[in-house]
Image (tube, rainbow, N blue to C red):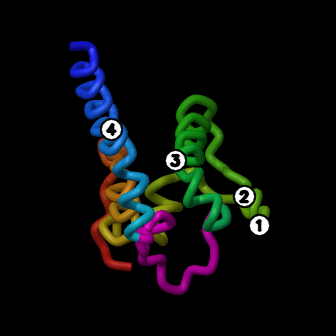
Amino acid sequence: MASRDTGRIVVGLVIFLVLASFPVWFSATQGRSDYRPELEYPAGETKCVESKEYMRTWHMDLLNQWRDSVVRKGVRTYTSDAHHTDYDMSLQNTCMKCHTNKANFCDRCHDYVGVSPKCWECHVEPRGAE
């Protein structure tokens, strides 16, 4: 009886390992492990408040810092580390001035990573085209 249970346990473990590792081997076989959605960047703009690499990774942290600085401390000016320029800490007046098409810019990455930011609960969603 013990050998029969051992076989079931081994089969169960194999099935578990295949299912648990599915995303890894599926991504590797599809050649899309470094896939990133193509974004439509603002036409005619040459720089953002920080570098493209920084903004890809840390934009949400930056926006949270801006919110805390403006709401809790009353500080409304941000000095960029990338090019030492001052910016108004405003999603609407700074970010959305260039990134006017939410569907072609914000939503592509947010949908890809499966997040639903709460920005639009308070801020007006941009509807124009870039």
Q: Does residue 36 show up magenta in the picture?
A: yes
Camera-near label (4 vs 2) is: 4
Residue nearest the viewer, comparing 86 with 80: 80
| Mark before the other along the chain sequence, 3 or 1 | 3
Horizontal relation, residue 82 to residue 125: left or right: right
Question: Which residue is pictured at 31% across the width and 57% down the height?
Answer: 125
Query: What is the three-letter code of the residue carrying label 3?
Result: Met
Crowding near the residue tagged with mark 2, few <14, some 14–19, many ≥20 C-alpha atoms within 10 Å: some
The residue singled out by tag 4 in the image is 14
Expressed as whole percent of the image width and height from the top left, the position of residue 113 reads 39, 53
Alpha carbon separation for disc pair 2 and 3: 15 Å
Disc 2/disc 1 C-alpha distance (Å): 6 Å
Boundaries of the magenta span: 31-49
- Neighbourhood count class around disc 3 (C-alpha, 10 Å): few under 14, some 14–19, many 20 upward: few
Q: Nearer the viewer, mark 2 or mark 3?
A: 3
Above or below — where is 129 with respect to 2?
A: below
Residue matched to label 3: 60
Nearer the viewer's eye, disc 4 or disc 1?
4
Report which residue position mark 2 lands on. Answer: 80
Point 78% across, 62% down: residue: 84
Quarter-of-image position of residue 109: bottom left
Mark 1 packing: few (<14 Cα in 10 Å), some, or many (20+)? few
Task: List the residue tagged with mark 1.
Answer: 83
* Mark 4 element type: helix
